[in-house]
Amino acid sequence: MRFPAVVVLTALVAVSCTATSGTTSTVVVPEDVIPTTIAPVSEPMESPGPTIVTSPTTTTTSPPSTTTTTTLDLDAAGSRMQADLSAIVGFGVREAGSQAEAETAGFIFEGLDQIGLPVEMREVALPTGLSSANVIASVGTGQPHVLFGAHYDTKPPSPGADDNGSGTVVLLELARRLATSSPAGLRVTLVFFGAEEVLVGYSPDNHHFGSRLLAEEMEAAGDLPDLMVSADMIGVGSGILAATYLDFDPTAGDLIVEAAAVVGASVDKQSRGDISDHEAFARKGVPSVMLWRPDNPDYHRITDVEVRSDALIEDLAILEAFLTLLTAED
């Protein structure tokens, strides 16, 4: 097989992960940024933010040109992801419908817009009477169509460095890569989902609002992706899982396992329940998987303030290798 220049991590990533294994970066959460009340998304932010739309209207910018990239500067990528994580955690506990969640959506939107990707924000109504939002960017044209997703909300009282600041910053870094080198013949959609966590005071099925809404919208438009990957809690544990949804199509999980092998990583595949945003797309018949590092003792705790830079770099490598497998030619 021939692997195109859009992704060139492989052995370099394996060397970097070995060299930095076990290191962590701690994000200190100031007490004064943890909100004590829930505010609607529609409240004004300190700085101007994007307008939330209820129809799929895309905001600006021409698509990036297809170019050849050099090998990813791993130290720079790690630094950017940690800087993004510090900013996101600094907004506070990002409960669905809160001001902190809205500010995070604005941060993501602005970051994607600044690197030149077409980006839009779509409102997600909640049964609480408040609103969340999906932030959506796209790059490339053609088939297959791959959707990468990560939720940015958190379960109180957690500031969510790992769950799911980790998935959010990895997708932001992937967006930077794709903005300079769109994969030929491949369409990639990057979605930052709001309101993934179970709403406080509601039954356990009151979750995944952003992804369930988008799956419905894409089905209605006849535009469901060919594959979907949810990056969720990928910054702490050493073991990596490709979690597929129940007995639905395992193809995406198989590809994640194969992509990990390309970059010298090991991923186990398991079938699980509706534990992340891949569930909504699997139910629509889309081969879907959750990339997950499950071993985090601080899950949903106020102490979720720490991630490993080498883990984030390895995750990024796996997602990029996933794309190479789809664009590789014999």
Image: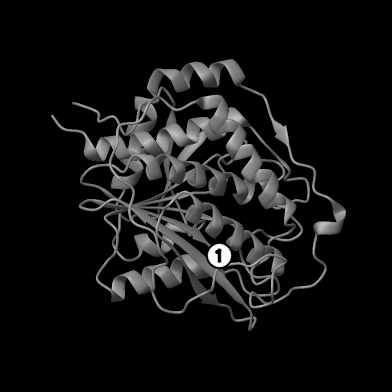
Question: Pointer 1: what residue?
Answer: 194
In the displayed orientation, state which residue is furthest to the bottom. Answer: 129
How far across and how far down the image is residue 289, in percent?
40, 49
Task: Look at the image and tell me in which quarter the N terminus lies.
Answer: top left
How many marks are shown on the rendered structure? 1
Does residue 288 appear anywhere in the picture?
yes
Task: Look at the image and tell me in which quarter the C terminus lies.
Answer: top left
Taking 47 as reference, is 7 above or below it? above
Apparent side of residue 202 relative to residue 317 in the rendered image (left or right): right
Apparent side of residue 326 relative to residue 149 in the rendered image (left or right): left
Taking 228 as reference, is 292 above or below it? above
Label 1: few (<14), some (14–19) or many (≥20) C-alpha neighbours in 10 Å = many
In the displayed orientation, state which residue is furthest to the left. Answer: 330
How far across and how far down the image is residue 169, in percent?
56, 45
- Closer to us: 161 or 288: 161
Colour theme: one colour
Taking 190 as reference, is 206 above or below it? below
Does residue 299 appear anywhere in the picture?
no
Residue plotted at (77% across, 58% down): 157
Apparent side of residue 71 relative to residue 5 in the rendered image (left or right): right
How far across and how far down the image is residue 33, in percent?
81, 58
Residue plotted at (61% across, 66% down): 198
